[in-house]
Image (cartoon, rainbow, N blue to C red):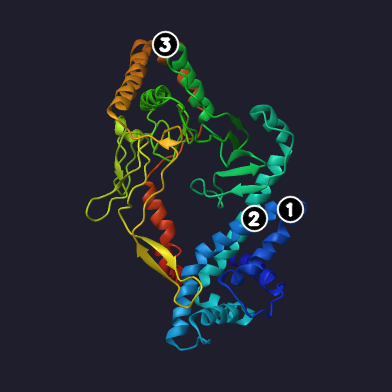
Amino acid sequence: MGTDNYNIIYDEAVNDYIYSDKTEWEIEDFFQPYINWALNKIQHLYQKNNLLRKNFEENLLVNLIDISIGSLILELNIHKLDQKLEGESKFDRLKNFIRKISIKKNREFFYNDYPILKEYTCKKLIYLTDFYTEIYNRYNSEYFQLNKQFNMPVFQEIEQIQFDKGDSHNRGRSVCILVYGTNKIVYKPKRSCTPALNNYLAWFENKDITFKFKTAKVLNCDKYCWEEFIERKSCDTLQEVNDFYYHLGGLLGVLYSINGIDYHNENIIANGKNPVLIDNETLFTSNFNTEVPIKIYPNNILSTGILPFNAFLNAEGNGIDISGVFGKSQLLPRKIPILKNITSDEIKYAYEEAYSEEKENVVKLKNISVKLQRKHVDYFISGFSRILNIIIINKKELINECKLLNIFKDNIYRVLLRNTQTYSDILKNLKHPDMIISASQRKFF
């Protein structure tokens, strides 16, 4: 979409908005014209569904604040230095700043100084409204197939769409979770490789009855899929904890055999005694020459991401373990920016120490997280060894006779040319005011 089209969207949003004469202004009020524009575009989706409308507003507001807040804080501080802020208190000064900058004429002056932000904002409006519409229409039109595949209840309206459950691609699309009543289902804007992997796991189960891998059900469609929501559950007995690690070791062997990588602690769910793989798009990984070396070692078991390794290293070489066997809370190796003083003209980002949240790959016993012990390692190694023995004993059948690996050939796999932190840093830096002010600086970056 060209710049002219973005200007049309901006003009529609701003010109059609009726500005309030209220005196209590908050940062959220600056974005109300855009939210109203988007709500008008998808009003047919929520006419009888206030929960979905509220959910859409919240998601859109979070996205708009995320891309704009740095520029708004910079502009606020410029006004402060120029002594243009009005108000007796620091709280009043922020309210007056938001009120003034929200006026159409001043809003245009603001975007003249931050030209990329205007286009960026309009893109968010288009991408999120399109994505909501896409999900809503597909859920409603395919409910019969979903009911059949996942044994879903009588039709229920979507109440909530939880975004940011994975990296975004292709006009802001990402993995998301749909909530309807007490139930959930996962929507992925790409076809899933999980059915092929499930068949591969079933072959191992037929060779050794000690393995019973739990897998997610999938309904693959044209260029997207629906996937069973896997919930973290607790084990009831010590033996179930042992079974968890036995099967996790088995999964390590299976993934190692097909060069599966990126199975860190966010891609495995501890569903009682069952470790369940939930993101299976990085199989059959090869070695690629890249401008920046990456820590992926094909044919090396460490590449799976399941065994302990440190990531997000700081200047001192300290990091955190994000492997598939570890998911406890840890002190992050770098201070992270946290928004402070959000109701006053002293609003700012402050870098503070923070801890990661415990991940859902951590097995629980009677709702208490289990600490990895030596006996668990023994079960883990046993599961891994048995899988490798199956491969060695049945190598001829696996490769030549049953042509089992052919089940993977029609899938599209993801190639990781950089680690996740690199991609995250790029996206975060693109929201910095320096990148919003200058198009040439943004392109250079």
Give the residue type at disc 2: Phe
Question: Where's the C terminus, which quadrant?
Answer: bottom left
Q: Where 108 sits versus 376, above or below?
A: below
Give the residue type at disc 1: Tyr
Q: Which mark is residue 56?
A: 2
Q: Classify mark 2: residues with Cα within 10 Å, few (<14), some (14-19) or many (20+).
A: many
The CA span between labels 2 and 3 is: 52 Å
Residue at image coords 57%, 79%:
101
SS category of the residue bearing label 1: helix
Q: Are marks 1 and 3 in contact (CB under 8 Å)?
A: no
Q: Are marks 2 and 1 in contact (CB under 8 Å)?
A: yes
Percent x, y of residue 58: 61, 58
Looking at marks 2 and 3 on the same chain, the residue that comes earlier in the sequence is marked by: 2
Q: Quadrant of residue 145?
A: top right
Q: Which mark is residue 397?
A: 3
**Closer-to-camera residue (50/444):** 50
Question: Where's the N terminus, which quadrant?
Answer: bottom right
Q: Which residue is mark 1?
A: 46
Looking at marks 2 and 1 on the same chain, the residue that comes earlier in the sequence is marked by: 1
SS category of the residue bearing label 2: helix
Looking at marks 1 and 3 on the same chain, the residue that comes earlier in the sequence is marked by: 1
Question: Is residue 224 visible to us here?
Answer: no
**Closer-to-camera residue (263/160):** 160
